[in-house]
Image (cartoon, rainbow, N blue to C red):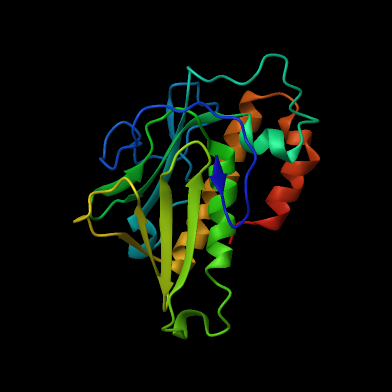
C-alpha cells in the first residue's frame, strides 16, 4: 500500500479514516513483543534506549483480524510483491514520545512489512545530498497509499526530518526527528518486525527476499 518513488501495483481494501491521535497503537514501554497475534500491538524496539533523541521516536504496529493472510500461503517462497502488498495487514504508528503526539493509521489493511521496508528506503532517499546534515536545502520524500489519497510527507533540512500526513489537522506541527536517529529506529523496527513475523509464520525466515531485505538495511 505504500509507495516510495515509483508506482506500486497492489490490491487493497479501503477502510475507515486514518487517525492522528495517540491511542490504540500506543505500546508499552518494555521491550518488543514476539509472536504478536492478529489484533494485538507491538512496539518493535529490541534495544535499551541510550539518549534523549532515541527516546523521542517510537514505531509500532498491530496486525488485523479483518484482513488475514491468504490461506495456505507459502511464506518460504513468497515473492517481493506478495510480501509487500498481500501479507501482514494491519496498522502502524510513528510517535514522538516526548511530545506525546503520533501519526497513525486506522484502516486495518496497511501491509506492515511494506511500511517498514518503505520507511527504511525513504530515510536513505533523504540522505542523498552530499552535504548531509550541513545542507540547508530541503529534501522531500513521501509515502503514499495506493488505495487512498493520504500520504506521509517527509522534509529534511540540515540533520532534521519533519514528518506530517495529509490527514493531520492543518494547525498541527510536524513530528520532527534527528535523521540519524530516525534511520536507526527505522532499521530496528524493520528487524524486530521481521523477528516477530518469522516467529508467527513457518518458512518466512528461509525466504531469500527476507534475507536480502535484512542485508540491505542492517541495524546501525
- Looking at the rendering, which quadrant does residue 105 occupy? top left
Between residues 172 and 44, which one lies in front from this camera angle? 172
| Quadrant into which the C terminus falls | bottom right
Q: Is residue 12 visible?
A: yes
Q: Is residue 192 visible?
A: no
Q: Position of residue 145 (x, y in %)?
A: 49, 42
Between residues 37 and 12, which one lies in front from this camera angle? 12
Q: Which residue is painted at 29% across and 59% down in the image?
A: 174
Between residues 178 and 78, which one lies in front from this camera angle? 78
Q: Position of residue 201 (x, y in %)?
A: 66, 24
Q: Which residue is painted at 29% across and 51% down in the image?
A: 97
- Outermost residue to the top: 71
Q: Which residue is painted at 76% across and 31% down in the image?
A: 78
Q: Viewed as shown, does residue 158 lie left or right of 68?
A: left
Q: Which residue is painted at 49% across and 48% down in the image?
A: 144
Eyeballing the image, is 195 above or below 142? above
Amino acid at each position: 500500500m505504500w509507495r516510495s518513488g515509483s508506482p506500486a501495483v497492489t490490491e487493497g481494501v479501503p477502510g475507515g479514516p486514518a487517525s492522528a491521535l495517540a491511542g490504540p497503537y500506543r505500546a508499552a514501554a518494555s521491550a518488543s513483543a514476539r509472536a504478536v497475534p492478529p489484533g494485538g500491538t507491538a512496539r518493535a524496539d529490541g534495544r535499551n534506549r541510550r539518549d534523549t533523541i532515541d527516546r523521542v521516536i517510537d514505531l509500532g504496529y498491530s496486525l488485523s483480524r479483518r484482513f488475514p493472510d491468504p490461506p495456505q500461503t507459502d511464506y518460504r517462497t513468497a515473492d517481493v510483491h506478495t510480501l509487500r502488498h498481500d501479507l501482514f495487514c494491519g496498522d502502524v504508528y510513528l510517535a514522538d514520545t516526548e511530545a506525546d503526539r503520533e501519526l497513525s493509521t486506522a484502516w486495518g489493511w496497511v501491509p506492515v512489512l511494506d511500511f517498514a521496508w518503505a520507511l527504511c528506503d525513504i530515510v536513505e532517499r533523504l540522505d542523498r545530498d552530499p552535504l548531509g546534515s550541513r545542507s540547508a536545502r530541503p529534501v522531500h520524500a513521501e509515502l503514499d497509499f495506493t488505495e487512498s489519497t493520504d500520504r506521509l510527507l517527509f522534509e529534511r533540512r540540515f540533520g532534521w526530518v519533519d514528518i506530517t500526513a495529509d490527514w493531520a489537522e492543518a494547525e498541527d506541527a510536524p513530528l520532527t526527528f534527528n535523521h540519524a536517529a530516525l534511520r536507526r529506529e527505522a532499521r530496528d523496527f524493520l528487524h524486530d518486525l521481521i523477528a516477530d513475523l518469522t516467529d508467527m509464520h513457518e518458512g518466512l525466515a528461509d525466504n531469500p527476499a527476507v534475507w536480502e531485505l535484512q542485508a540491505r538495511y542492517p541495524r546501525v
